[in-house]
Image: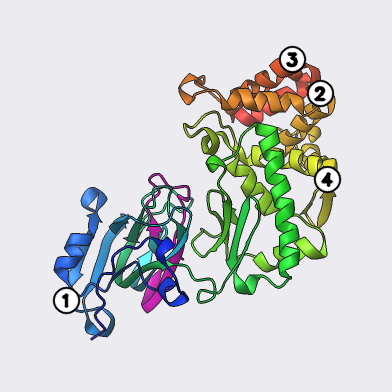
């Protein structure tokens, strides 16, 4: 039988005074008491598709555990609300997990309910198939109320690229939440004016001084984004860049606070290039650019159209303003030379007479407007657009209408119709066809 842990009252992390105390769990449950389990956990079984059972045995060493199962794809979950955490502090949520024929979606997974959170997609590594007991974890930031809702699930309840929901059977044991300890958890941390970097220690081979030089450049990028759109995200709080195992394959990173950087991609080579090639890091600048969308600044979901375009468009301004460097396709682009990269996509689509929906090609056409009128027309347009309440936005019938709506604000700032002045009728016909398909 495993060792019996008692519940530990949640403590404000400001009271932690020693490394030993920093490693103490603020919350722990080995499910050795059914009464305690029922008092501290809430169950979610949407559509009654899944089943949650308290088992008196079946856990580690034959002790009690929680069994979650579903024959159909579901998001079946137990959850516990934490309070008294330190806002902005990083915590580690861990468990032991066993699986049987788990498949689809995010599989068996730990996650944080995103209600009021800025890290909606944060999770542990997704577990599939059949396996014996293995440790899983996820790191998360406490919200501004010092709260978080931890979840042990079969499937993920919010829509993701892989659908989120899963089927099969999963067992959970040895739940723990504690403050992250950089040394014990092998996390490399550096902090600058606007950024907190927390990476797996084995991903960083360059010196602290080299990392600080890179972060100073990202600070300049952040300030240039502010200059372009007229405000900062998350009430000006620092943005954390955090390695995570819990991202769908194919995603390099996900924006939010923290920015979740997939620890299965080539993190080390990106960090190395910041020093060896003076490469400011396209991917991280892109994700920081996402945080400057209207919803993160105004909080009520103001104007937003295709933020994949505009995260990069903000970056074009910042690189020009900072004379910074990004690399793509094994080529370094510096300052306003980044327009040469986006012209590649224009030449492959609109320039070649092909009506293909390509955000980078549109990005190039927006840079042509900048070449004619300067960046001030965009600064004025973004400020005006970000001030529009979502309820006052038009009902768009197509992405082409969204593009024209955006450019109408640029036209107001320019004092003339920038569409008529910078696009040919043939270009507009191709763009319209690509965006209305």
Q: Position of residue 49 (x, y in %)?
A: 24, 54
> Is the residue marked by circle 3 packed among few (<14), some (14-19), or many (20+) residues within 10 Å?
some
In the rendered structure, which disc, 2 or 3, sits on the residue that comes first in sequence? 2
In the rendered view of the protein, which quadrant contains the N terminus? bottom left
On the image, numbered disc 3 is attached to which residue? 417
In the rendered view of the protein, which quadrant contains the C terminus? top right
Closer to the eye: label 4 or 2: 4
For the magenta stretch, what is the residue range?
111-139
Relative side of 135 to 265, left or right: left
Q: Is residue 67 visible?
A: yes
In the rendered structure, which disc, 4 or 2, sits on the residue that comes first in sequence? 4
Q: Residue at x 66, y 18 (%)?
A: 408
On the image, numbered disc 2 is attached to which residue? 373
Q: CA distance from mark 2 to mark 3?
A: 12 Å
| Tag 4–tag 2 contact (CB < 8 Å) | no
Instruction: Point out which mark residue 273 bears.
Output: none
Closer to the eye: label 3 or 4: 4
Q: CA distance from mark 1 to mark 4?
A: 63 Å
Q: Secondary structure at mark 1?
A: loop
Q: CA distance from mark 3 to mark 4?
A: 30 Å
In the rendered structure, which disc, 1 or 3, sits on the residue that comes first in sequence? 1
Q: How is the image coloured?
A: rainbow
Q: Residue at x 46, y 54 (%)?
A: 162
Q: CA distance from mark 1 to mark 3?
A: 72 Å
On the image, numbered disc 4 is attached to which residue? 323
Closer to the eye: label 2 or 3: 2
């Amino acid at each position: 039988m495993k060792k019996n842990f008692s519940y530990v009252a949640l403590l404000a992390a400001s009271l932690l005074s020693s490394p030993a105390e920093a490693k103490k769990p603020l919350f722990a449950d080995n499910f050795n008491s059914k009464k305690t389990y029922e008092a501290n956990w809430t169950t979610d079984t949407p559509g009654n598709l899944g089943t949650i059972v308290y088992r008196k045995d079946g856990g580690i060493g034959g002790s009690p555990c929680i069994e979650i199962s579903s024959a159909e794809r579901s998001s079946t979950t137990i959850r516990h609300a934490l309070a008294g955490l330190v806002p902005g502090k990083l915590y580690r949520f861990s468990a032991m997990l066993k699986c049987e024929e788990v498949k689809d979606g995010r599989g068996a997974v730990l996650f944080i309910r995103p209600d009021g959170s800025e890290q909606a997609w944060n999770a542990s590594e997704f577990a599939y198939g059949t396996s014996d007991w293995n440790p899983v974890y996820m790191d998360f930031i406490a919200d501004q109320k010092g709260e978080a809702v931890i979840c042990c699930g079969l499937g993920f309840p919010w829509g993701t690229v892989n659908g989120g929901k899963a089927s099969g059977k999963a067992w959970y044991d040895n739940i723990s939440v504690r403050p992250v300890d950089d040394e014990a958890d092998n996390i490399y941390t550096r902090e600058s004016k606007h950024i907190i970097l927390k990476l797996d220690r084995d991903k960083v081979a360059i010196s602290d001084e080299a990392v600080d030089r890179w972060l100073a450049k990202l600070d300049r990028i952040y300030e240039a984004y502010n200059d372009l759109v007229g405000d900062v995200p998350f009430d000006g709080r620092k943005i954390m860049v955090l390695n995570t195992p819990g991202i769908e394959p194919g995603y390099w990173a996900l924006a939010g606070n923290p920015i979740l950087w997939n620890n299965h991609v080539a993190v080390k080579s990106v960090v190395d290039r910041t020093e060896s090639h003076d490469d400011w890091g396209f991917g991280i600048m892109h994700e920081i650019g996402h945080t400057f969308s209207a919803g993160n600044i105004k909080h009520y979901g103001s104007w937003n159209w295709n933020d994949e375009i505009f995260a990069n468009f903000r970056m074009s301004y910042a690189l020009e303003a900072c004379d910074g460097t990004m690399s793509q396709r094994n080529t370094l682009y510096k300052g306003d030379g980044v327009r040469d990269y986006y012209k590649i996509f224009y030449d492959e689509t609109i320039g070649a007479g092909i009506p293909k929906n390509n955000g980078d090609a549109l990005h190039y056409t927006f840079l042509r407007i900048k070449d004619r009128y300067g960046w001030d027309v965009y600064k004025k347009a973004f400020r005006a657009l970000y001030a529009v309440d979502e309820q006052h936005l038009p009902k768009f019938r197509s992405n082409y209408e969204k593009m024209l709506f955006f450019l109408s604000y640029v036209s107001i700032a320019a004092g003339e119709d920038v569409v008529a002045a910078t696009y040919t009728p043939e270009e507009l016909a191709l763009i319209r066809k690509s965006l209305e398909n």
